[in-house]
Image (spheres, helix red, strand yellow):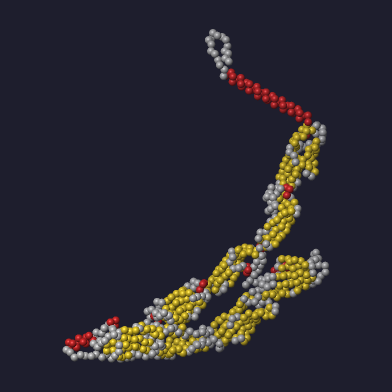
Amino acid sequence: MPRHTMFGPLVLLTALLDWSTACPLTLQPPEVVQAFGTSISVNCTSTADGDKGLYWTLGSEKQDEGNLYTMLEIPRIDWNTLAYCTIKLNDNHACSEMLQIKTYKKPTSVTVQSNGIKGKQLELKCDVRDVAVVQNLTITWYMNNDTVVNTTNHLPTGANLLMNVSTALTRPVQDAATFTCEASEWGPQGPLFVSSDTWKIYAPKFAENTYDIHLNDGDEVSLSCDVMSSPPPHYRWIKDGVTVSNNISFNINRSQVNENTTLECEASNDLGSDKKTFIVTVPETTTPTPIIITTTITPTTAATNTTTAAAAAAPPKSSDCPVTIAPDKILVKIGDPASSNCSTTETDAEGLGWEATTDGIGLTPVTHLEWRAKEVKAWIITAKCFINLQNGSQCSKPLDITVWKSPDEVRVSPTDNSPMEEGKPRGLKCDVFNVAPVKKVQLKWYQNGKLVHTDRDSFQESNATLANVTSIWELTPEKDHNGANFTCEAELLLGQEHNPKAVSKPYTANVLYKPRVTCPERYAGRDLLLDAVRCEADGNPAPDMYWYYKDKLVNSTKPLTRSESGTYTAEFKNDLGKTRADVKIIVEYGPSFSCNDHYNVTENFKSGSECEPEGIPKPTSVWSKDGKVIDLPETWKRLDSGLYSIVATNIHGRANHTLSINVLYMPKFSEEAITKEFNEGENVTLECSADGNPPPLLHWKNPKAANVHVSTRGRLSYVLVFEATSSDAGLYSCTATNELGSVSKNVTLMITGKTKAVHHIIFIVIAVFVLFLIFIAVLIYRHYRKKSGHYDVIGLSDISPLTPRS
């Protein structure tokens, strides 16, 4: 965890303020010892007379001022909380008292782990995570509730430091014991304690030490030596004093055992050992009841005797045998009685009998004969009813007998002790102990009571009778499997309406998976903490959460400022991986203004952008002028200059601001160009005035003469011509200029008499020009008429001139 120090801010504060032991301030309480994330209240009072007020500073923000006292409320203490009270002694001097804040935090967790047993010494480790202390941290070890070690860790204090602490314990291995680790630190009301879970050590101990196993022909049995202990045990199987296996289970079958024998299983760890004995018995060979076949020999020839003997040697087939067995199939539970009736309708029958591996019946001269077993003890029983006929032949029909037994136990467990991880194939094992017959076994897997898998084919080819059977269901763990209850049901398919069934205890799966994260795309609020963002994370183990901003780790317990809005990344991490989610964080705050108090704007430019309030959500603004609410014009006009008030409002408050608007516009003359006449020798005054904002500068462009003078007063400028002469006549130009541009106006100065003469000359010239145009037009017309007339041709003797004919 990062270390936060207050040294830098203290140096700065010392340079800015007068820190003095004689400062007339009293803090109540003078020192605060408080848990991280909690609130405090501190009062600051003054004992000075005539001071200028006192106030608190929290971090870099100044709080409201008071006169005799001021109260500071801190809603949440963090590692960087800095507060001091300041009194203004006069206009030039102030002094301050720093509030001493000591922050502590109880450990997030205290856990005990074992490093194993080395050289008869048990090694344990106590891990204390995320603790911050005010005084020393004490770690106490308890064995069987008695203190064995008490360690005080001299950790750094007063530096606001989160840390992890570990301490080890080594003890000689003795009898069973329980160990607990306790971490304690000093709080404001005394020591604070956080204890770990109890960690136990004990030797293996079997619930029962002797088991009887009956092994029949074709049986195969798996013997288990499973037992709980801490540390986990080592296993050893012993037969006739010789170790034959070191596995947790041992398999035997009837073909390996010809006589009664004994197997021992020993489980041991460093604290002790225990044995379990399996007494294996095999059934004695049963001698069938002798069947006496009596054949009557009739005296005859040799040929006849040979034919009779041949006929007797060829008994009817079983399906043609004239006997009826009812029922012809029986299901019998081991240890229960069994019976079936055999009958015949043949009139030449000598009698019936039962050939059986137990409770057989010899030939009896009856037509109905019942076979009855008081107690079925063998797993494989054969019985058939035979009939002897008077012709010396014999035939039989078998009785179908199935001996069954419900399992002693059905158990579900993983195929190994490694944890289940999402996406990595794993096997669940269903062990069925002591069930018969094996080929009738069907296993069903259930997840939270819902059938998910059936295993019927694994055992159909087995000839075993009583045996332990195992079915392994391969599955790929998913997140939804975590916490699910898996059960295995063993059913004997005996064809009955209600077949025997046995169900295991639930096995609760613990599936490890990387974090799944759901975070809002956008999160907004005031006084916002990243820890308050509602991100939902799911993972196994439970993930740790970290916040990043621009790939840098940030303190999620520190309130964000308005400048710290942006896209943050929430990272959730556990041993299987990490998952990230981006969240757009918007730190909301009330309206405020950073505008100037005065703005110059240009006429006809867009209004309203001069002073925009800050705030999130965006504030609404209301403008007022002369005490009346107004709608801003689309563009500024020169009459809009004045004093304005703005009120900005959003959900977090309101703010006011007053500003003046000065509308600037280009110069403009009150009149256009003019002509002014004067008499020679008189004094002439030419005026020039212009409106504009800022007020324009006026400048004359005029003929240079000794009797011509320029004078400017405010927005008026004058040209004074003393005793004007003809040389003073001409064009005078006045130019008005401000920062937005310039305009000009011309004034023409003329002598009065010369103006009329000029007018006459101009009239004469125009008249002469008009007459000239008329003369030219007449000439053109006459020339045209000469070319286009009608002529007569006469003889040469006629000397008269040619005249046109009209």
Q: Is residue 683 above or below residue 417?
A: above
Q: What residue is shown at x 63% (from left), y 23% (from top)? A: 777
**Along the viewing direction, whichever of 303 and 237 lies nearer the viewer:** 303
Q: Which quadrant of the rendered structure holds the C terminus?
A: top right
Question: Residue 766's x, y, as percent?
Answer: 69, 26
For the image shown, how many numbered marks are present on the structure? 0
Question: Residue 759's x, y, as percent?
Answer: 74, 28
Q: Which quadrant of the rendered structure holds the N terminus?
A: bottom right
Residue 550 picture quarter: bottom right
Q: What residue is shown at x 53% (from left), y 9% (from top)? A: 796
Q: What residue is shown at x 62% (from left), y 69% (from top)? A: 531
Question: Which residue sits furthest right?
Answer: 49
Residue 530 appearing in the image? yes
Q: Is residue 326 above or below residue 42?
A: below
Question: Residue 701's x, y, as percent?
Answer: 75, 39
**Along the viewing direction, whichever of 220 and 448 lies nearer the viewer:** 448
Left or right of 655 in this view: 129: left
Question: Residue 580's x, y, as percent?
Answer: 56, 67
Residue 699 appearing in the image? no
Question: Which residue sits furthest top?
Answer: 797
Left or right of 798 in this view: 715: right
Residue 144 picture quarter: bottom right
